[in-house]
Image (tube, grey):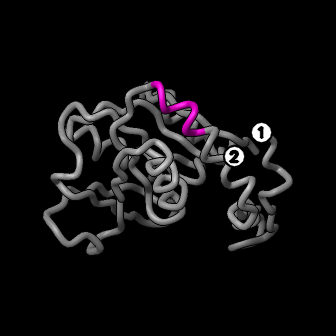
């Protein structure tokens, strides 16, 4: 599936020298959005996945739709203070500082087969934090799924070094 026509490239956003990949045209096209979710569902349906874990915020869009298509649960990974029950947290490095992801302690049971989903793989910091959280919960990480991978930012190398398989629909 060629998504390059429905993912807009916005130069110099949010700062000079950055090309922002905007997924909103993909989301606005119901037929293309359905094809994207169907492609992910075809991949994961035979693999015995029990939960789709979505990374805040755009990962929620794809992860909830995929969980629905597969008839399984969705688990959100959120920024601190957004989840109401007991949580586990994982802090990770950003280009300038750090951030944290949280998950409810009881949303994943040991041995559950999960797919971690986000809209975009760039440097890999966020998804590596997600992987660490799920490992702490003794989940079986089937794969990480992304609509877009930015090859020049090396997130894919971090996943390979951690021996975590990933699947992407579109590479820039």
Picture coordinates of residue 130, whole percent (x, y): 37, 48
Give residue 23's mark: none
Q: Residue at x 35, y 64 (%)?
A: 78
Image quarter in which the C terminus is found: top right
- The residue where tag 2 is placed is 35
| Residue 21 visible in this rendered orientation of the protein | no
Residue situated in front as seen by the camera: 9 or 76 = 76
Q: Quadrant of residue 103?
A: bottom left
Circles 2 and 1 in contact, beta carbons < 8 Å? yes
Picture coordinates of residue 18, whole percent (x, y): 74, 63
Determine whether the residue tagged by mark 2 lies in a helix, strand or loop: helix
Q: Quadrant of residue 47?
A: top left
Q: Residue at x 36, y 33 (%)?
A: 141
Give residue 1's mark: 1
Q: Mark 1: give few (<14), some (14-19) or many (20+) Cα within 10 Å.
A: few
Query: Magenta region: which residues?
Result: 40-46
Q: Is residue 149 above or below residue 96?
A: above
- Report the number of discs: 2
Main SS of residues in magenta? helix
Determine whether the residue tagged by mark 1 lies in a helix, strand or loop: loop
């Amino acid at each position: 599936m060629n998504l390059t026509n429905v993912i807009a490239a916005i130069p110099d956003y949010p700062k000079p020298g950055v090309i922002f990949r905007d997924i909103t045209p993909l989301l606005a096209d119901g037929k293309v959005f359905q094809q994207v979710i169907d492609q992910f569902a075809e991949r994961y349906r035979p693999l015995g996945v029990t939960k789709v874990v979505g990374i805040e915020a755009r990962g929620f869009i794809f992860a909830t739709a995929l969980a629905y298509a597969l008839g399984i649960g969705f688990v959100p990974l959120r920024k601190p203070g957004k989840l109401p029950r007991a949580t586990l947290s994982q802090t990770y490095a950003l280009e300038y500082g750090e951030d944290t992801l949280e998950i409810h302690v009881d949303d994943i049971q040991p041995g559950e087969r999960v797919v971690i989903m986000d809209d975009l793989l760039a440097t890999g910091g966020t998804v590596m934090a997600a992987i660490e959280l799920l490992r702490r919960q003794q989940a079986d990480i089937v794969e990480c799924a992304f609509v877009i991978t930015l090859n020049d930012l090396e997130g894919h190398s971090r996943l390979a070094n951690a021996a975590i398989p990933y699947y992407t629909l579109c590479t820039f």
